[in-house]
Image: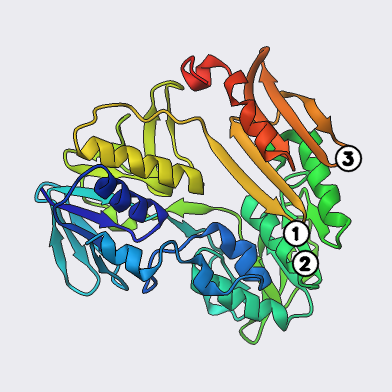
Amino acid sequence: MTVLVVGASAAGLGTVEALRRKGYADRITVLGAEAHLPYDRPPLSKQVLSGHWESSRTQLRPAERLSALDAEFVLGDAAVSLDVRERIVHSASGRSLTADEIVIATGLRPRTFPGQTDLDGVHVLRTLDDALALRAGLLSCSRAVVVGDGVLGTEIAASAAGMGVPVTLAGPQPAPLAAQFGPVISDLLAESHTSRGVVLRLGAAVTGLDSRDGRVTGVRLETGEVLPADVVVVAFGAAPATEWLEGSGLALANGVVCDSRCRAAEGIHAVGDVARWHHETLDVALRLENRTNATEQAGHVAGVILGDDRPYTPVPYFWTDQFDTKIHVHGILSADADVSTVEGSVNEGRFVAEYRRNGAVTGVLGWNMPKQARLRRPELTGVLTGGKP
């Protein structure tokens, strides 16, 4: 049996490592669109952007550990099509790679405004090269605007403010991450940003970008207001990188559609941000965009490839670091949930909040209390855990 992993990401590398750890000794090939060896993405919007880390620190494994995996890494060559029946992946350079088992780990691509790639001063943040280019832009700008009030946008705004850059955060929500955290926690996050100099222009959608002579000059809101900027970061979401799979016969709907074992077809699997699989415990199609899921799902798919026929039913988890605040979330939060502090104190800046719907705990959020939040995972309703802690 041979294995081809498409995507030299954390999920892709995690699949390779799990296969080797579980005893698989045959050929593994990893095809990656970027020229870099596998690296970690969460530090890009924080440690790398702020300058606290050199880019080399993001590399997931040193060269000797990658070599010990005995896998062939084909980098700087994007996948362009997949023949599902023959299990052949064609690449941009003309390669045709075949394997008995194929794992799709191509991740996400940032959403953009029409025409933004033609403008100087407009950035996205997905890759290491994106982070380095954005840092260079921020260091020489007079005013930055971040478009996007979700996790990535708020992390970028926090990093920019920490660098001393005048920055405005724009987005349609009433407060940062309001749709996920609800009003109580999102208002605290808004206060954290404004107290450190971030200007919030929230509650109005961004309709486009203004420019002059090929360079961005501002961000237009639906209210008619224009936010001046010489650097704009577009961070209002990302889409699964599945364009290369169109016409392959795989089901594509907000990701690669998979069964509960993360199989998209016989011998074809998907892991990480690109995978939309059936979560048997929740009985929903789920796609998670976070680092923890990338590793856990990769390990599970490696087991499935080797014959472990079990559904993948994780308790969702993610974290975000902004300024001196570390937020850890277990389970599922919703804006209309009943939120109560069960440990610590909001006034002291360290607390655990529980999210309840219909009396059942569906999510736990730790604000500068990561260990305490993790210890409350067993309190999540059996709907999430299948009756297990």
252 or 7: nearer the viewer = 7
Other-residue count near label 2 (Cα within 10 Å), few / some / many at <14 / 14–19 / ≥20: some
Q: Position of residue 327 (x, y in %)?
A: 69, 43
53 or 75: nearer the viewer = 53
**Which label's residue is closer to the chain start, 2 or 3?**
2
Residue receiving disc 3: 348
Q: Looking at the picture, which amino acid does disc 3 mark?
A: Glu
Secondary element at image label 1: strand
Q: CA distance from mark 1 to mark 3?
A: 26 Å
Q: CA distance from mark 2 to mark 3?
A: 22 Å
The answer to whether mark 2 and mark 1 are in CB contact below 8 A is no
Side of 217 where 23 appears, left or right: left
Q: Position of residue 272 (x, y in %)?
A: 40, 47
- Say which mark, if any, is on residue 169: 1
Q: Looking at the picture, which amino acid does disc 1 mark?
A: Leu
Residue receiving disc 2: 162
Q: Is residue 180 visible?
A: yes
Query: Closer to the observer: label 2 or label 1?
Result: 2
Secondary element at image label 3: loop
Q: Looking at the picture, which amino acid does disc 2 mark?
A: Gly
Please report the residue visible at 37 percent of the width from the left and 34 percent of the height from the top: 277
| Scheme by which the image is coloured | rainbow
